[in-house]
Image: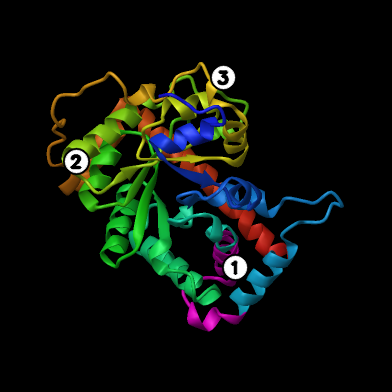
Amino acid sequence: MASSPQQSLLDVLRSYSAVDCDTFGVDVPKKLGLFVDATSNQAIAYHELIRVADDGKVIHAQLIQDAIGFASSRTPAYPNVSVTELAVETMMVKLALRIAPYVKGYSHIQTNPKYAYNKQKTVENGKRIVALFGELDPAHDPGRICIKIPSTWEGLHACRELEQHGIAALGTTMFCMEQVVLAAHLGCTYIAPYINELRVHFDDYVDEDKAFDFCRSAQRYLDKLGSKTQVIPASLTSIQEIMKLAGAHHITVAPHLLTELADTPAKSWSGEIGSVFKGQTEAGIVDYGDIAEDESAWRLAFTRSQEGKAEAKNIQAINIFCNKQDGLERLAQQH
């Protein structure tokens, strides 16, 4: 693709894919928007909420206090959740509302990962998040909220129930085709294949088995199936990875990488662009049998996928998100 003298890599990426910002911080979306969606999770929320200014003060101290006050006052309306948990959800919604002017699509909020194996609590959590948006900003379009849910059997069935109630849902922590098949069957709006294991963002660890092939297979499967479900590659660590994935339905990118893309002139780029989706053909749709309708068959197929590696990565990601949820709850309790 030819580039104009003023084009950046971010401009090029936007010509191939819908670009989402993976952040709760407002600075980069404000500078580089308009983005399509704004994605988030407990890790992003926690690290945004503990940020401090040059004077050492917590940047979002007032937001945290306001969220706790709101949650305390709304206990009668939400009797099945603790004040602490409601405060955490309120913090995340408040952060999302700050970014909403700089996106034209969905604001994504992830459900409590501790409910990853409880469909009903996840559904209740998703509906509560939508209700909180309405309470905190009645002008915000409820049709622009997407609920992110870990891709377990229970989590993806929670996605289906939310979709049936008109709430967009995304299956996250996705590492194998068995998860993709179930998500498509259940009608998720989005799935988020993780290109790198989640731990790369927190440990001294490099993922040597990046999931480019899986991402390509997932998108081609969905396209050939005629599914409404769209792919959002996530857990990216470099602009090289990002540009390889140009052509994905969506792509969600962290602020520091968005800045690097915007600062890199397209004419100087000699790396790959869209190579993940080029020059590879897959005949027909792989037959996964009836696993999407059979819980025990799906669980076994998921457990055996990649000789157990896919399920292990999913468990690892859920654990990390649970740890960040614990951190958010401590923040709510300490203020």
Q: Earlier in the sequence, mark 1 or mark 2?
A: 1
Between disc 3 and disc 1, the foreground one is 3
Which residue is at the far front? 5
Which SS type dominates the magenta stretch? helix
* Residue marked by disc 1: 87
The dot on residue 250 is none
* Residue marked by disc 3: 268
Judge left or right: residue 296 versus residue 259.
left
The residue shown at (62%, 56%) is 328
Look at the image and give the residue range highlighted in magenta.
Answer: 73-96
Q: Secondary structure at mark 1?
A: helix
Which quadrant does the C terminus fall into?
bottom right
Judge left or right: residue 288 versus residue 320.
left
Judge left or right: residue 185 versus residue 274.
left
User: CA–CA distance between discs 3 and 1?
Assistant: 47 Å
Q: Is residue 26 above or below residue 303?
A: below
